[in-house]
Image (cartoon, helix red, strand yellow):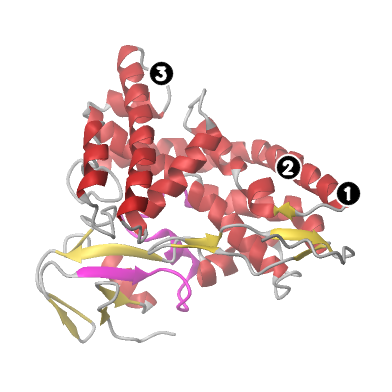
Amino acid sequence: MTGCPARYDEQLGYWVVDDPAQARDVLLDPRTFRPDNAVLAHTPLAVKALRVLSAVGFALPPTLANNAGESHRPIRAAVARFFSPARVAAAEPFTRELNAVRVAAAAAELASGREVDLVQAIAAEPPALVVLRLLGLTDVDVPALKAWSLDSLELFWGWPDEDRQLELAHSAAEFYAWLRSRTTAARQAPADDLFGALVGLGLTDEEVCAVGYFLLIAGQETTTQLISAAFHRVLGEADRAAEPAELVECVLRDSSSVPTWRRITAEPTTLGDVDLPAGAPVLLGLSGHGGPADLAFGIGIHRCLGAGLARMETRVALESAGELLAGVRPVEEPPLIDLLSFRAPKRLRVVTRGNTEDNSRP
């Protein structure tokens, strides 16, 4: 659907912009539509959660996604070199190897009559392992990184109550403390990795940690979710015959793992026929409204640096799992990760098509 005017959603608390052309215009005008609210907690954090974060010095100063200032360009340039087209292309064999091992293990489980969750079995870990290699980072607890990532997405883009906020804040604080330890190590012995590059720019500890915090989440968890969404689409039968690269573009257009993103007006402005006051929070629809696939990665100075990597990893996952996906059926309509700006199947439980047993679990 196109041509819909911006509307205020009282429940969400945002001016919602679903028209792709208007969303594009907003993203291309960071002076008027600033990114200051891009990584703020959608649900205001309670005092107990804030105390937990404060205890580790948690801070997210403007660096990448939330930065429209002069420091944005050099930080982006330093990070962009890790995601160059040449480096992404060079990472494809490793990506394919990771997927092949996991697809083979999942196929063996299915062949023995057992149920498999395709998210955990195939989609979860390869994006983390690939991005860590690209960033030059070793000795990282990948299961911990995955848990930290999901918890942080819920903390900043979900609707957690105070008790849940406290749980999530402890997880985010643990992640942040780890980032601080890596930053300290980089200052003592700089290496040719993400932290060494950021320290070399002369950034503060808080700025280095802020870049690392969301880059290490966005660089892998959103791709896991994109792969999960693509698998779900194949399991839904409609696109089983599509070429993997084509299917990736369909998912990005219709059901991307990052369907919305936020901006805030710096001054009174007009969007289409709608007048917006200064300080108006805006929620942009990036996927599912008839726009181009590229819109899912943003446009302009804040376009996702990992767009090419995410496309490659999702295509490789589909190619590697193609035969397996053709021979399985889902055992449930999957529960969703359903946050303000992140949406994907939480799990994809499947069995072989010839398996007629009830494999459902409470």
Query: Residue 12 falls in which quadrant of the image?
Result: bottom left
Residue 177 shown in magenta: no
Residue at 24% x, 45% y is: 48
Residue type of the residue flagged with mark 1: Ser
- What residue does disc 2 label? 102
| Tag 1 secondary structure | loop
Q: Residue furthest top?
A: 188
Residue at 11% x, 74% y is: 277
The image shows residue 148 at horizontal and vertical percentages of 44, 41
Q: In the rendered image of this protein, does residue 89 appear above or below residue 350? A: above
Query: Residue 71 falls in which quadrant of the image?
Result: top left
Residue type of the residue flagged with mark 3: Ala
Q: CA distance from mark 3 to mark 2?
A: 31 Å
The image shows residue 88 at horizontal and vertical percentages of 55, 41
Foreground mark, 3 or 1, reads 1
The image shows residue 155 at horizontal and vertical percentages of 35, 51
The label shown at residue 191 is 3
Of the two numbered discs 2 and 1 on the same chain, state the one appearing first in sequence: 2
The label shown at residue 112 is 1
| Tag 3 secondary structure | loop
Residue stretch rendered in magenta on the structure: 281-307
Of the two numbered discs 3 and 2 on the same chain, state the one appearing first in sequence: 2
Q: In the rendered image of this protein, does residue 35 appear above or below residue 83? A: below
